[in-house]
Image: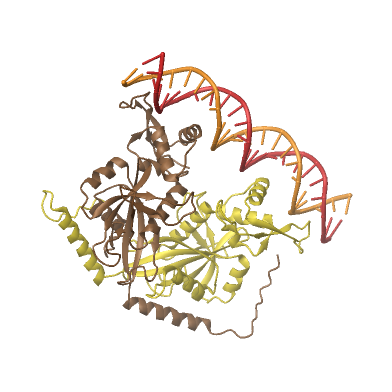
Chain colours: A brown, B yellow, C red, D orange
DNA sequence: AAAATAGTGTCTATTAGACATTATTGG
DNA sequence: CCAATAATGTCTAATAGACACTATTTT
């Protein structure tokens, strides 16, 4: 490998000064004009073989009438994580559920009113708690089905469907945000304990498999799925069995935090 | 994390109104008090078996005298990605290199002057271009070796060392930011074509292996590494050989974008 | 008994790691 | 020839997928 850096170029311009000036110019500008910082949270659950999320109908422009993720503006006395928790609590009536920062969206014209940077989060909750929280939802919000039109971790936008399977128009870049959340979930599912976040305290191996299949968007081999999960060290048998099924009841398992990787 | 807005009484208040009020309060606050949005870029290269990065000595408080990642404030007319490119260009004299958004840091007191949200990026560049860019660096900046005190994808902060191996004090949360960059790189290395970003246009399989070992922090099996890389479809043999080595020259390969996953 | 799912055992294909062997260059 | 690394071939261990079979519950 030949690497011969041509050390002595002819004339070096005074780079330090140029840099300083550029920096100061930018710094001053930022002092007088700061963007708004918003937080948007994709609350995701899995039920009946589909991912679902809570969306709110926008009452005002921009994106008036379109469906947006629950969100809000960052207050000066709260961290980003705290703001996401607050949004989750205020807009979705959910507390203490899995919450992870996703990506920060900052296209110049993503909100035509003013410059808005949005820090996207996603939250995972099991179907029962999601249903319960959504019971008291306002009539401007809706549970939408997340349709993922791409396979694997290809990525891209998703579509939101109402209960009749009709496509819902999405606000801002929130279809992209949700797509990124799905992509992230698919990527982490095999090595991080996030599938459990979509289930209750105890669950059967088949229920866990269904959740994985819903997130991944494809069927899983039953035998090797069982083996992988049981060998992962993340599951603990409770010794209890299902009691409300009309066939042989399966054993219930519990998620246990593993000590180390 | 429990933040009940305790608006009115213990009896369930009208939820819509409470929500609206809370939202409007937050919105109004944000109109009058907005955080500054900064961009910090970890420029990373691999050479001599170690990861290296460019850091700048802070001339002013806060973190005066400590070493910070190149950064700047977001301007109103540029996207986050554009701002990161600009910082890369202005502070590191690098253009058109791999750049990826990492994470957004928003602890309330991370900058004692004022509320600052920082969107962290990392950039990857091969050793030759890094060296060349760093030739013209200002005397308040430095190439530091990144020491990763944890294994695998455990994560955590890293340490920055000068050429004598002495630990450098780091500014703000930048040691955490760099740690996250390393963790991200380790996680993506096996399935995303990012190792190539640390190499020149052509490279031998051994050079590629060294880069992977440097990023991962552990040795790779030579045989299976070759097989994996050659089967990945990401490499194309150039037919050319090394010409400045004192042993059998290895074939040079080139990175090719794969059509689909 | 029939239906339905739970759970186990085994075979095979694939892949990674280990190791040996041959090939090719410069000194 | 020797030293050094490139490149290939083969054996083994681990793992995922496929399939068959047995087990247990309700109707």
The residue positioned 26% from the left and 48% from the top of the image is A94
Residue B140 shows in this picture: no
The residue positioned 36% from the left and 59% from the top of the image is A174
Task: Please state the horizontal and vertical placement of residue A112, each as a whole percent of the image.
Answer: 32, 71
- The quadrant holding residue B164 is bottom right
Taking depth in this image into account, of A40 and A260 the one nearest to the observer is A40
- The quadrant holding residue C27 is bottom right
The answer to whether residue B187 is left or right of residue B231 is: left
Q: Is residue B12 above or below residue A226?
A: below
The answer to whether residue B93 is left or right of residue A87 is: right
Taking depth in this image into account, of A80 and B228 the one nearest to the observer is B228
Give the number of marks: 0
The answer to whether residue B204 is left or right of residue A58 is: right
The answer to whether residue B192 is left or right of residue A63 is: right
Taking depth in this image into account, of A46 and B7 the one nearest to the observer is A46
Task: Please state the horizontal and vertical placement of residue D21, each as a whole percent of the image.
Answer: 52, 19
Q: Is residue C19 above or below residue A52?
A: above
The residue positioned 45% from the left and 80% from the top of the image is A22
Taking depth in this image into account, of A26 and A173 the one nearest to the observer is A173
The residue positioned 22% from the left and 50% from the top of the image is A137
Task: Please state the horizontal and vertical placement of residue A210, each as a whole percent of the image.
Answer: 41, 38
Residue A94 shows in this picture: yes
Task: Please state the horizontal and vertical placement of residue A4, each as a whole percent of the image.
Answer: 69, 72
């Amino acid at each position: 490998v030949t690497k011969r850096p041509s050390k002595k170029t002819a004339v070096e311009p005074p780079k330090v000064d140029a840099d300083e000036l550029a920096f100061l110019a930018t710094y001053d500008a930022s002092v007088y004009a700061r963007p708004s910082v918003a937080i948007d949270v994709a609350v995701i659950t899995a039920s009946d073989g589909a991912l679902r999320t809570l969306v709110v109908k926008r009452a005002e422009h921009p994106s008036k009438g379109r469906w947006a993720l629950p969100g809000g503006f960052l207050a000066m006395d709260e961290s980003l994580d705290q703001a996401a928790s607050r949004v989750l609590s205020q807009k979705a009536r959910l507390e203490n559920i899995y919450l992870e920062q996703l990506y920060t969206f900052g296209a110049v014209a993503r909100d035509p009113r003013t410059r808005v940077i949005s820090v996207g989060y996603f939250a995972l909750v099991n179907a029962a708690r999601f249903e319960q929280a959504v019971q008291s939802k306002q009539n401007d919000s809706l549970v939408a089905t997340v349709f993922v039109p791409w396979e694997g971790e290809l990525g891209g936008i998703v579509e939101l469907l109402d209960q009749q399977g009709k496509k819902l128009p999405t606000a801002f870049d929130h279809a992209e945000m949700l797509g990124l959340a799905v992509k992230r979930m698919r990527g982490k599912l095999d090595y991080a304990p996030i599938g459990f976040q979509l289930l209750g305290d105890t669950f059967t191996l088949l229920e866990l498999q269904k959740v994985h299949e819903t997130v991944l968007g494809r069927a899983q081999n039953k035998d090797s799925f069982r083996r992988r999960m049981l060998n992962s060290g993340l599951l603990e048998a409770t010794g209890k069995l299902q009691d409300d099924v009309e066939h042989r009841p399966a054993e219930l398992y519990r998620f246990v935090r593993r000590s180390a990787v």
